[in-house]
Amino acid sequence: MPRARTTPARKAAAPKKTKNETKLTYKGAGVDTHGAAALVGDIAGLVASTQKHRKLANAFGLFAAAYDLGSYKHPVIVTGADGVGTKLEVLLEHDMLETAGKDLVAMNVNDVLTTGGDPILFLDYIGIGRIDKAKVTRLVAGMAEWCAACRCILAGGETAEMPGVVPDGVIELAGFAVGAAEKKDLLDIARVREGDVVVGWPSAGFHSNGWTLVRQCLSKLGKKVTKAQVRELLAPTRLYHEEVWALRKKKVRVHAMAHITGGGLPENLERLLGDHGADLRIPEWKLGVIPQILALCDPVSMLETFNMGWGWVAVVHPKDVKKALACGEGARVLGNISRRRGVRVTVG
């Protein structure tokens, strides 16, 4: 049932029961369409908070959202789709629904930012066994906060009530981001050259990748890690829009950008480098109880699974390194682009 629907529910006359039959209803089968419609009103203010800098070209609540690209001379649409992964199970366990909403937005918006484009519209899908207005509203509140932070409109969504398919206590989440860029401003990875410098910006933790391994480590650590420490590990995925906008403002010659998600630094950088490679040296990751988790992991596997403390990377012209390092707190030179293919990461 689309959450975008705003048509008021009409009261229907109660069907007359015959002596030998009882008429079936959708609500009786487990789906409350009236409750879903009422939910739209509950989140209207949250949606409105994401339209302070950009506006939809049509009304919110229709079957599809529209955005006017008239301010662009040669617009190119960029898109992304992602979820929160098995981190969601731990977030639900700790009742951190707002964080799940933020994770969903960041995982998609950051991918759009890597192209050189701006995130414009975000849409979500929520699958739930039975509509829980409080839970859905909290999820949407997290999405709205992160959308507003990067000037992205929460354009619509779908809340699917699926009793018997989605178990009680489980929520399915998926997100979709739409962005745009001037054609001339799109990043072209063909510009990457030997000698370019890899600059990284810190992550807030594991973000939304590698949690199947994290959960296994937490299970093994048991009471050595407190609930408070687990909640710290669940910090929301960072948005990197401010760093990207700063790079543009300072006219840093950026040849490529990567959002460090599943696959870690090696996989996410390799897809950008073509016939080139990179040699990186990163410091030990000492955030919270993360060292205790890493101590349980195979050294190669952890590099190929986690972001290792670096959620965003830009490949920049060597003469622009100083300007790049001024674009966001905690920026650091991680290494250089080389002719030798593959990404080699040294820790320490």
Image (cartoon, grey):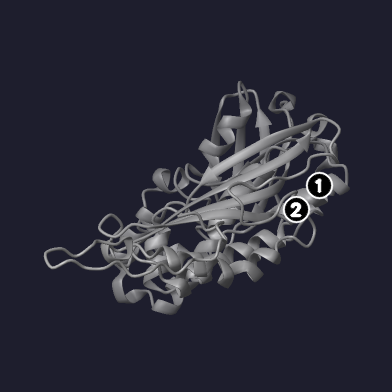
> Residue 310: x, y in percent?
60, 52
Q: Classify 275 as above or below 44.
A: above
User: Which element carries disc 2, helix, strand or loop?
Assistant: helix
Between residues 245 and 160, which one lies in front from this camera angle?
160
Q: Position of residue 187 (x, y in %)?
A: 74, 32
| In the depicted structure, whether residue 21 falls above or below residue 274 | below
Answer with left or right where residue 135 lies relative to residue 212.
Answer: right
Q: Is residue 251 visible?
A: yes
Q: Quadrant of residue 146?
A: bottom right
What is the C-alpha distance between the residues marked 1 and 2? 6 Å
Residue 326 placement (x, y as % from top left) = 82, 54
Label 1, secondary structure: give it.
helix
Q: Crowding near pointer 2: few (<14 within 10 Å), some, many (20+)?
A: many
Label 2, on which residue? 243
Q: Which residue appears at 44% of the width and 46% of the height?
A: 305
Can the viewer see residue 284? no
Residue 108 - label: none
Q: Amino acid at mark 1?
A: Leu
172 vs 221, left or right, is right
User: What residue is shown at x 52% (from left), y 47% (from top)?
Assistant: 261
Residue 59 falls in image quadrant: bottom right
What's the residue type where badge 2 is placed? Glu
Q: Does residue 84 appear to the left or right of 298 in the view shown?
A: right
Q: Quadrant of the N terminus?
A: bottom left
Q: For this rendering, which residue is in front, 44 or 111?
A: 44
Tag 1 residue: 247
Camera-side residue: 50 or 87? 50
Q: Are marks 1 and 2 in contact (CB under 8 Å)?
A: yes
